[in-house]
Image (tube, rainbow, N blue to C red):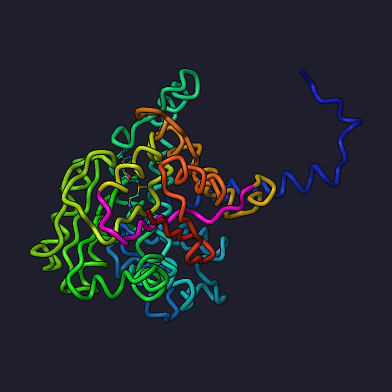
C-alpha cells in the first residue's frame, strides 16, 4: 500500500521524522556508551577537567582518531560537553549518570540490559514468541541482561529501600531490627537482598530465584561483601521457596515477570509470619494506557514487550501482567491470592511500592 502524500500534513511528518532522528541517534549511541565504559573513557573524564582527544586516548590506551569521533558523538547527544578549541569535559551531572556506579542516577545498567535484547539471535527468538505465544524464558537471554538489570535497578534500591520503603511498611523495621527473617523472591543478583542484610545485622535474609546463574552470582557478591553468614541465596521458584515463616517477603521488579503471580502470592501467604508483610516493588504506572503514554511508560512498555511479557508467557499459567500493570491490576492479583489488605505504601518517579498483608 502506498501512502497518498497529498493527505500527509508536512508539519506533522517533520515532527515525526524529528523524533525518529532523535531515536536513531539514541540507538547508535547505546553501543558507544557501553564502549565508553569498557574502554574507561567515561572514568577518565570523571575528574571534570577539559581534555583534548589525544590526551584522552593516551590516558586510556586508545587511538586518538576513534576517541575523537566517540567524543563528538557523545557531545552531540549532550552526554559530554564540548567546550570549543578541541576540548571536551564531563559535568558533575554527566558523571553521575555515566561514570559513577554508586550514584543514584547511574544509568549504564539500562544500556547494558536493553542492548542485550537487540542482537539478531534475540530478535529471532522474539519473533518466534510473538507468533507462537509461548514466550521467551529469562534464562534464554544473554548474560548482559542479568548483569544490566541488576545494575539498572540497584541505584534506585540504594536510594530508597532502607530509608523510605521499609519504614513505610507496618512494623517491619522493628521486626528486622530484633532478628526477623526476610525472603527476597526473584532476587536476581541479590542487591536488594544484601541491602536488607547490611541494614539489619540481626536479621536473616534469604534470596530466592529460579535462575541458577543469577543465584551463583549473588552468592559470589555476598561472599565479597562479607554478609554471607546472614544473607544466603537459594535456587527456588516463587511457588516453592521454603524456610518460612518470614516477617517480610519482597518481590523487587519481578512479580509481573512471573507466569503465575497469583500462585506466587498465595504461596508467599503460606510462608508469611503472622502479622508479616509482603512488599511488591513494581514499575511506576497508571491503570490506563493513556496515563502511560510518556517517556517513562515508553521505556517500561519497551522492556515489557521485549522481556517481561514473554518471560511470563514462558512459565506456567502465563498471566503476562506486563511491566505497566498499574495499581488496580496488581491489587486484583493479590486479591485472587486471598490477600485483600493491599495498599500503596510508597512511590518514586520510577516505582510503586505496595504492602500486602494476610
Ligand atoms: C527483572 S528481574 C529482577 C531481579 C531482581 N529482583 C532485581 O530487582 O534486580 C526478574 C527476576 O525474576 C526471576 N523470576 C522470574 N520468574 C520467577 C519465578 N517464577 N520464580 C522465581 N524467580 C523468578 C528471574 O529469574 C529474574 O531474576
Which quadrant holds the N terminus? top right
Q: Is residue 272 magenta?
A: yes
Q: Say whether residue 44 is visible.
A: no
Residue nearest the viewer, comparing 163 with 34: 163
Residue nearest the viewer, comparing 343 with 124: 343
Q: Residue furthest right?
A: 6
Residue drawn at x 86%, y 35% as measured from the top left: 8
The number of callouts visible is: 0
Q: Say whether residue 142 is visible.
A: yes
Q: Position of residue 188 (x, y in %)?
A: 28, 50
Start-end of magenta stretch? 271-287
Q: Is residue 159 magenta?
A: no
Residue nearest the viewer, comparing 341 with 112: 341
Of the four image quadrants, the one with ligand 1 is top left
Residue drawn at x 38%, y 47% as measured from the top left: 254
Does residue 356 appear to the left or right of 140 in the view shown?
right
Q: Position of residue 233 (x, y in %)?
A: 16, 52
Residue nearest the viewer, comparing 174 with 213: 174
SS assignment for the magenta stretch, majority: strand
Q: Quadrant of residue 319?
A: top left
Q: Position of residue 184 (x, y in %)?
A: 27, 55
Q: Position of residue 216 (x, y in %)?
A: 15, 48
Does residue 177 lie above or below 7 as drawn? Answer: below
Q: Residue furthest left?
A: 229
Residue drawn at x 27%, y 46% as measured from the top left: 270
Amino acid at each position: 500500500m502506498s501512502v497518498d502524500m497529498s493527505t500527509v500534513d508536512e508539519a506533522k511528518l517533520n515532527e515525526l521524522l524529528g523524533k525518529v532522528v532523535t531515536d536513531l541517534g539514541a540507538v547508535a549511541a547505546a553501543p558507544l556508551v557501553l564502549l565508553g565504559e569498557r574502554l574507561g573513557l567515561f572514568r577518565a573524564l570523571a575528574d571534570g577537567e577539559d581534555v583534548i582527544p589525544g590526551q584522552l586516548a593516551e590516558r586510556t590506551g586508545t587511538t586518538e582518531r576513534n576517541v575523537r569521533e566517540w567524543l563528538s558523538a557523545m557531545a552531540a547527544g549532550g552526554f559530554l560537553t564540548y567546550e570549543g578549541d578541541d576540548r571536551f569535559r564531563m559535568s558533575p551531572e554527566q558523571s553521575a549518570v555515566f561514570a559513577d556506579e554508586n550514584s543514584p542516577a547511574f544509568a549504564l545498567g539500562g544500556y547494558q540490559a536493553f542492548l542485550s535484547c537487540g542482537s539478531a539471535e534475540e530478535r529471532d527468538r522474539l519473533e518466534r514468541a510473538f507468533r507462537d505465544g509461548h514466550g521467551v524464558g529469562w534464562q534464554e537471554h544473554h548474560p548482559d541482561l542479568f548483569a544490566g538489570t541488576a545494575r539498572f535497578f540497584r541505584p534506585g534500591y540504594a536510594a530508597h529501600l532502607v530509608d523510605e520503603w521499609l519504614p513505610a511498611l507496618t512494623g517491619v523495621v522493628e521486626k528486622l531490627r530484633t532478628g526477623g527473617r526476610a525472603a527476597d523472591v526473584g532476587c536476581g543478583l541479590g542487591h536488594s537482598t544484601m541491602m536488607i542484610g547490611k541494614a539489619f545485622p540481626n536479621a536473616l535474609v534469604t534470596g530466592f530465584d529460579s535462575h541458577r546463574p543469577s543465584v551463583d552470582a549473588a552468592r559470589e557478591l555476598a561472599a565479597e561483601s562479607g554478609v554471607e553468614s546472614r544473607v544466603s541465596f537459594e535456587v527456588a521458584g516463587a511457588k516453592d521457596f521454603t524456610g518460612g515463616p518470614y516477617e517480610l517477603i519482597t518481590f523487587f521488579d519481578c512479580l509481573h515477570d512471573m507466569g503465575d503471580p497469583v500462585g506466587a502470592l498465595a504461596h508467599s501467604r503460606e510462608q508469611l509470619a503472622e502479622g508479616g508483610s509482603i512488599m511488591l516493588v513494581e514499575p511506576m504506572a497508571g491503570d490506563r494506557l493513556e496515563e502511560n503514554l510518556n517517556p517513562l511508560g515508553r521505556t517500561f512498555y519497551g522492556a515489557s514487550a521485549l522481556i517481561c511479557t514473554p518471560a511470563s508467557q514462558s512459565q506456567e499459567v502465563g498471566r503476562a501482567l506486563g511491566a505497566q500493570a498499574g495499581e488496580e491490576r496488581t491489587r486484583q492479583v493479590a486479591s485472587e491470592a486471598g490477600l485483600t489488605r493491599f495498599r500503596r505504601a510508597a512511590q518514586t518517579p520510577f516505582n510503586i511500592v505496595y504492602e500486602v498483608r494476610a
